[in-house]
Amino acid sequence: MLRPSNPTTTWQPGTSGGNNLPSGPAGRPAPPGGDGHGPPAGTPTVTIGSYPDYPSAQRVVDYLADNRFPVERTAIVGTNLTLVETVLGRMTTGRSALLGAGTGAWFGLFIGLLFGIFTAGNWVAVILVGLVIGAIWGAVFGAVAHAMTGGQRDFTSASSLRAGQYAVTVDADQADQARQLLGRMHLSPTGATAR
């Protein structure tokens, strides 16, 4: 017969947990902080500058690093993210077979090299056979995979995330020092860092 568990001996969100948490392979875990609804908040941060592109934000962090600022306490945060999918070209069954042949050839070359190491006879022939068989199977699988899409998505593309703005943040207790260093950076004649 099962006994109901005692609610005072189990961990509840928002409580410290005490000794009620079971120990695991790495020892006794630390009780969760906060209200039990996610990871505890880290060190508060302050935005020291916002930039329209990533190289500008990177230049700021690089300048801070050059001036011995503890850059491990900084972050570059991209905001207003946009997913951009750049269409590279039309995908046909022939092109898909060609791309599959290239991938298969690399795999066949790898397998051929693996078998070639242990071959007492003509190891070059083993490598070439592996390459050719890999290319043939890759072409077949590439063509079949494209044909199975039924004409949907007959193009190739590359996706990337782009941010509208890049903010450089630092831990709140380091914000004054970072602002002082940035003030010196903007006073330089070219606005760039000197090495």
Image (tube, rainbow, N blue to C red):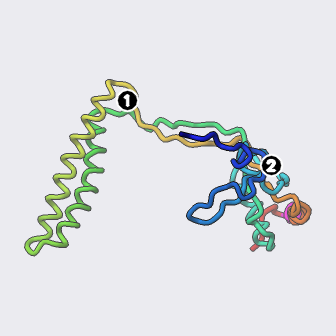
Locate the C terminus and report the quarter of the image it occupies: bottom right
Residue 154 in percent (x, y) is at 37, 29
Q: Secondary structure at mark 2?
A: strand
Give the left or right position of residue 93, taking residue 22 as reference. Answer: left
Magenta residue span? 185-189
Q: Overall secondary structure of the magenta stretch?
A: helix
CA distance separating discs 1 and 2 = 40 Å
For residue 3, the mark is none
Circle 1 packing at 10 Å, graded few (<14), some (14-19), many (20+), is: some
Q: Is residue 194 magenta?
A: no
Q: Which amino acid type is marked by label 1?
A: Asp
Please tell me which of labels 1 and 2 falls first in the chain: 2
SS of the residue under disc 1: loop
Drawn side of residue 100 relative to residue 136, left or right: right
Name the residue: 24% across, 40% down. 141
Looking at the rendering, which quadrant does residue 83 occupy? top right
Estimate the x, y position of residue 173 in percent, counting from the top left: 88, 62
- Indicate the quadrant where residue 144 lies: top left
Residue corresponding to mark 1:
154
- Give x and y (percent) for residue 106: 28, 56
Q: Residues within 10 Å of mark 2 (few under 14, many from 20)?
A: some
Would you say 120 lies left or right of 151 here? left
Percent x, y for residue 16?
Answer: 78, 53
Along the line of sight, which residue is nearer the eye, 137 or 97? 137
* Viewer can see residue 168: no
Q: Residue at x 65, y 43 (%)?
A: 5
Tag 2 residue: 50
Which of 115 and 8 lies nearest the eye of the viewer? Answer: 8
- Looking at the image, is 162 positioned above or below residue 146? below
* Corner quadrant of residue 169: bottom right
Q: Nearer the viewer, residue 171 or 124?
A: 171
